[in-house]
Image: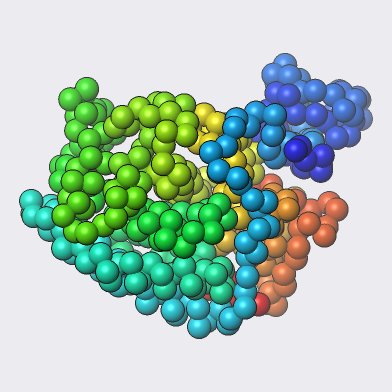
Amino acid sequence: MSDRRVYLISVDDLLPGQITAEPIYTPDGLLVVASQARLTDALIMQFEQLKIPHVKVHMPVVDDEESAGIPFALPDSTTVELREDTPLQIEFKNGKEAYLVLASMLNVARTQVIAGKYPSLPEKTIRLKVEQMIGTYRRNYRALMILSRTNMRQHESVQHALNRAIVSLAISIQITNDQEEIIDTVIAALVADIGMYSIPDSLTKNPGKLSAEDKKIIESHPLVSAKLLRTKGFSNRVLTNVLDHHERFDGTGYPRGMQGFEISVGGAVIGLADTYCAMTSKRSYKGSFSPTKALSELNSKRNVAFQGDLVEVLIRNVGIFPIGTLVELSNGEVGIVNRPNPDDPLLPRVTLVMGSEGKRKNYLTQINLADLEDVQIVKALDPDKFGMDVSSFLFMP
Ligand SMILES: [Fe+2]
């Protein structure tokens, strides 16, 4: 499937191979290239030299020709509808309660492993709280997605584990009807990095300067995690998912270098959710993060690091721009992504918070980018630069 919709793209973010959607002129009105032309590096460079700021192109969202075989029958993205049956406030509170219990267990486990002890992770309580989260997501998916974008003031690694678990849940629910399988994926997403805490900070915080020996230690963490969890009554499937969460589709992962469908589905889901959470975290938005960059980064991982269909499920159901992303629109207005759009992930619903003149809006309005012909997202912005707590804007209907 390819998307023939027109996107306004900053020249910095153009990619060779994209097709122009209209003739491109110099600021003086001279034709540079006709409509329907395929971009080359030379053309993009010419746009830069001519100081052409934006170009309208057709941009493929996904290219199914590149898809490899699939190990399970993947349903359409709409198979499990993203529902909002119960009030957001109630479900947010419900999800938050489960989140905080799980966070406190992870915090305790972290301290224990750092001290060289076995973690006291109570499997039954974790399972119960994970079920509570899944229930919340099924009744009101936004409650959990907002939670995953809220600063819950937890240790960075604990917050990352919980966000990764929520994104794993959102993917998992679309690819299997087996509730036990979903639970085992989410549990594994929570506890997969427990083994990391036994590794000194000096190694985990300096990934750029690792010696071969240090790399080996880091890459052993899925095994260490599984070993620590084995004594706590977690299912074999949880342990397998934990072991596989750094394996990659093309065989470049660790610890075993498994390939393709040798990797457990849960392990692959967690690996993808892990990458996505790192990519879309607030830190990654320092400066700006354009739709093209986000999309091309995710697409470049299709059938390389991750099974292509899993990437598509993620893009459609969680979005290129997750709920709560602050975005600049092509008309100069600034908004916050309010709901993803499974049919066109680059055109979500947005709450407008700032006019093109840079002034905060007195009355918040929502727009559906899919309904507007000429307005698109130009880039994602760093909310800190605007002194904005985006989650507070997400509770409007
Ligand atoms: Fe890990």
- Left or right: residue 328 versus residue 192 is right
- Left or right: residue 227 versus residue 131 is left
Query: What residue sits 62% from the left and 74% below the top?
Result: 84
Q: Position of residue 100 (x, y in %)?
A: 33, 72
Residue 229 seen in this snapshot: yes
Q: 154 or 276: which is nearer to us?
A: 276
Q: 196 or 39: which is nearer to us?
A: 196
Which residue is most to the top? 42
Res 366 → quadrant: bottom right
Q: How is the rendered protein coloured? A: rainbow
Q: 148 or 45: which is nearer to us?
A: 148
Q: Position of residue 65 (x, y in %)?
A: 70, 29
Query: What residue sits 60% from the left and 45% below the top?
Result: 73
Query: What residue sits 62% from the left and 78% below the top?
Result: 85
Query: What residue sits 68% from the left and 63% below the top?
Result: 350
Which residue is most to the left? 116
Q: Position of residue 377 (x, y in %)?
A: 70, 50
Q: 298 or 234: which is nearer to us?
A: 234
Q: Position of residue 253 (x, y in %)?
A: 37, 30
